Amino acid sequence: MIRRIIQIDQEKCNGCGACAAACHEDAIAMVDGKAQLMRDDYCDGLGDCLPTCPTGAITFVEREAAAYDEQAVMENKQRKMRKEGMTLPCGCPGSQSRNLQRQGAPTVETPQAQQTSRLSQWPVQIKLVPVNAPYFDGARLLIAADCTAYAYAAFHERFIKGHITLVGCPKLDSVDYSEKLTEIIRENKERKEEEPPAVSRETVKEVLEASGISETQLKAFEEHYESEFGADTVLNPQNLIDSKRFEIQTPDVSIKVNPERYDLVETRIIDGVKYILVRAGDDVEVNGIRISIKE
């Protein structure tokens, strides 16, 4: 049959071997330092080898040639792998051509509930998504091959649901995604701020109850907590145990205190009003201006 097939100019070939490495069908091999098309029926005529040749030694021609034999290509690959101590599948399962027959699959469509897409962002191609996209912040990442959505019927419900989805093909994209994926994870990690742990009155009460504290003492604790902090106040343990910081905050006031001198701060109720008192000496500044406190 007359069909399109590659032709290698032996005079232009410099023996680099790039075309042989690029040929997924193993149709090209290096012989005596030159690339040669080993069998016509191994060449699919798609020309993955053409752009890799630095000298332009490979071109397409129309000539009499045996038809491309995918089965022969697969058998050849299997022989090579067995010789090298490898077994299929060793790479992309997409290179294995076969019919898929579903045993017991219905031959007619049956009424089903309408399926809902679980995709929560766009684009999905790894090479297209920006590394600093806001949807990466705190996200659960799903990284999948392009073909998985076609091969697995419940892909949306089983995998995409609840995830930010990224897809690519390591075989055909000819791109090393490791750097971009690393950058996505790094950017997200730098932006993400961990929420500080919080302790409420109820949490402390549960701990005290579990420790065998009496009802009288528990009631005293609740009253003291409410008077000191307020019934609904949630405490941040990080602030309580951070020996390098002592900071007092209200909705309108923020006061930083040397953690070694927290004894200068006390709380009082004067005429029914709650106050935070800071004992002051002679060296007091407000906005860089030294002031004096008169009796």
Image: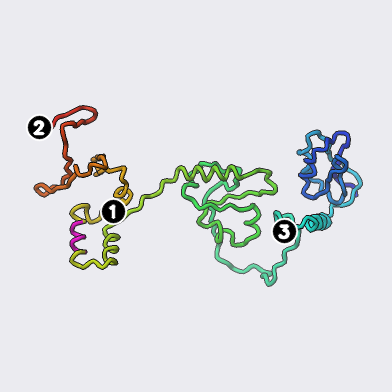
Question: Helix, strand, or loop for circle 1?
Answer: loop
Q: Amino acid at mark 1?
A: Val
Quarter of the figure with the C terminus = top left
Q: Is residue 145 magenta?
A: no
Is residue 70 something one can see in this rendering?
A: no
Which residue extends farthest front? 260
Q: CA distance from mark 1 to mark 2?
A: 37 Å
Q: Which label belongs to residue 89?
A: 3
Which of labels 1 and 2 is toward the front?
2
Main SS type for the magenta part?
helix
| Label 3: how many Cα within 10 Å (few below 14, some 14–19, many 20+) | few
Q: Earlier in the sequence, mark 1 or mark 2?
A: 1
Which residue extends farthest bottom? 104
Q: Is residue 53 above or below residue 143?
A: above
Res 208 quadrant in image: bottom left
| Label 2: how many Cα within 10 Å (few below 14, some 14–19, many 20+) | few
Residue occupied by mark 1 = 234
Q: Earlier in the sequence, mark 3 or mark 1?
A: 3
What stretch of residues is rendered in magenta? 218-224
| Label 1: how many Cα within 10 Å (few below 14, some 14–19, many 20+) | some
Q: Amino acid at mark 2?
A: Lys
Res 17 quadrant in image: top right
Q: Amino acid at mark 3?
A: Pro
Residue at the spot 52% in from the left edge and 57% down from the top edge: 161
Question: Helix, strand, or loop for circle 3?
Answer: loop
Question: Helix, strand, or loop for circle 2?
Answer: loop
Q: Is residue 223 magenta?
A: yes
Residue occupied by mark 2 = 294
Percent across and percent down for residue 133 are: 51, 43
Q: Is residue 16 above or below residue 207?
A: above
